[in-house]
């Protein structure tokens, strides 16, 4: 997808009503007060010598930077927010509300903008050392943790 296609999908998410119960359809999940989508991503790297992983990380980082730049032009300077789930912090029993739990399991930080009554969130997610790299976006009414 191009940056323009990412922006179009984000605009559609911003306009879309939230659902009453959590649902996941492929790379898109929604629930009460949020939509979360994988905009782009790589495969996993179980048998990679490290070179493919580095190239993929660079590709997702470049797409992430371009998307942040486009959204900054549209919405102004973002907040950069560290988000780490309780599971990654080692805090047992505590959970974050979605989409923050999933984002906190895969990203160290997010860029976010307040757009009306909703938060627009983008991040580069990494699912473990040998897992895929993903460019993610979320729209939510739930404040950051």
Image (spheres, rainbow, N blue to C red):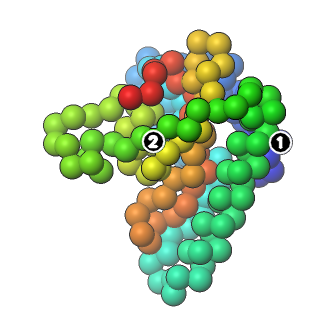
Left or right of 76, for residue 31: left
> Mark 1 or mark 2, which is nearer the start of the sequence?
1
Residue farthest to the left, as pictured:
93
Residue drawn 56% across the image and 38% down it: 80
Asked whether residue 53 appears in the rendered view, the answer is yes
* Total numbered badges shown on the rendered structure: 2
Give whichever of 106, 43 is nearer the camera.
106
Give whichever of 131, 18 is nearer the camera.
131
Number of other residues with Cα within 10 Å of mark 1, as a class: few under 14, some 14 to 19, many 20 or more: few
Give whichever of 82, 40 is nearer the camera.
82
Residue drawn 47% across the image and 50% down it: 107
Residue drawn 53% across the image and 82% down it: 50
Disc 2 marks which residue?
Answer: 82
Q: Secondary structure at mark 1?
A: helix
Q: Secondary structure at mark 2?
A: strand
Left or right of 31, for residue 91: left
Residue drawn 46% across the image and 22% down it: 143
Left or right of 84, for residue 57: right
Left or right of 44, for residue 91: left
Disc 1 marks which residue?
Answer: 4
Asked if residue 18 is positioned above or below residue 28 in the image, the reply reads above
Quadrant of the snapshot with the C terminus: top left
- Name the mark on residue 62: none
Asked whether residue 102 appears in the rendered view, the answer is no
Of the two numbered discs 2 and 1 in the rendering, the one whose residue sits closer to the viewer: 2
Asked if residue 17 is positioned above or below residue 107 in the image, the reply reads above
């Amino acid at each position: 997808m191009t940056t323009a296609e990412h922006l179009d999908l984000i605009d559609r998410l911003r306009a879309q009503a939230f659902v009453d119960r959590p649902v996941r359809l492929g790379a898109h999940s929604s629930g009460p007060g949020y939509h979360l989508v994988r905009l782009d991503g790589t495969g996993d790297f179980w048998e990679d010598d490290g070179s493919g992983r580095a190239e993929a990380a660079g590709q997702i980082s470049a797409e992430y930077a371009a998307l942040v730049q486009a959204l900054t032009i549209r919405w102004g300077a973002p907040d950069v927010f560290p988000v780490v789930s309780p599971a990654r912090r080692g805090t047992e029993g505590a959970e974050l509300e979605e989409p923050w739990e999933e984002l906190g399991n895969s990203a160290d930080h997010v860029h976010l903008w307040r757009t009306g009554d909703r938060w627009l969130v983008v991040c580069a997610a990494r699912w473990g050392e040998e897992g895929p790299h993903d460019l993610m976006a979320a729209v939510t009414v739930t404040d950051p943790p």
